Amino acid sequence: MRLTDAEWVVMNVLWEQAPATARDIRRHLPRGTAWAYTTVKTLLTRLQDKGAVTSVKAGRSDLYSPALPRSEARRNALSEVLSKAFQGGVTSLMHCLVETQELTEDQKRELLGLLGESGKEGQEP
């Protein structure tokens, strides 16, 4: 499932604040995002149509919750970038990340640790 930039903004709030009403979501939007209530409602409707969000009635309001886990959304987005920008080449992606990011020594160690762990999978102890 592909999320638009605006849908990512709403989902990021919802992953942190769920369950939430449209007004709650609007109140927690990042600084500089001056969307009208109706814009937030429209985005929530689109997300619901995509199956990324569920809602239940709570009095006169709807309470929204994410149906799409953040980890799955990230995997989908990364898959799309990997396919479009790197022709599926993970090594090219990693080179780009290392070259364009100022990685701290801790981040480098963490990355090497993750790579080491993934290399151990499937090996007999």
Image: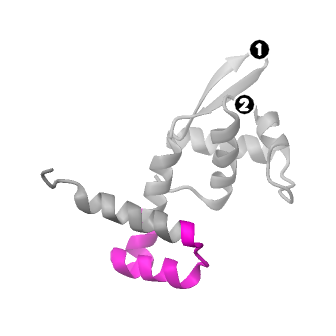
Is residue 94 located in the magenta-colored stretch of the structure? yes
Viewer-proximal residue among 22 and 99: 99
Determine the image quadrant of residue 55.
Answer: top right
Main SS class of the magenta portion in the image: helix
The vertical placement of 100 against 47, above or below, is below
Viewer-proximal residue among 85 and 115: 115
Q: Residue furthest left?
A: 124
Marks 2 and 1: which is nearer the front?
2
Q: Position of residue 93 (x, y in %)?
A: 42, 77
Q: Which residues are magenta?
A: 79-106
Image label count: 2
Q: Residue at x 44, y 57 (%)?
A: 76
The vertical placement of 75 against 19, above or below, is below
Q: Residue at x 45, y 48 (%)?
A: 72
Determine the image quadrant of residue 6.
Answer: bottom right
Q: Are marks 2 and 1 in contact (CB under 8 Å)?
A: no
Determine the image quadrant of residue 104.
Answer: bottom right
Residue 15 is left or right of residue 30, and the answer is left
Disc nearer the start of the sequence (2/1): 2
Q: What's the amino acid at mark 1?
A: Gly
Residue 58 visible = yes
Q: Position of residue 59 (x, y in %)?
A: 77, 14
The vertical placement of 106 against 99, above or below, is above
Q: Which residue is mark 1?
A: 59
Q: Which residue is mark 2?
A: 20
Residue 65 is left or right of residue 124, and the answer is right
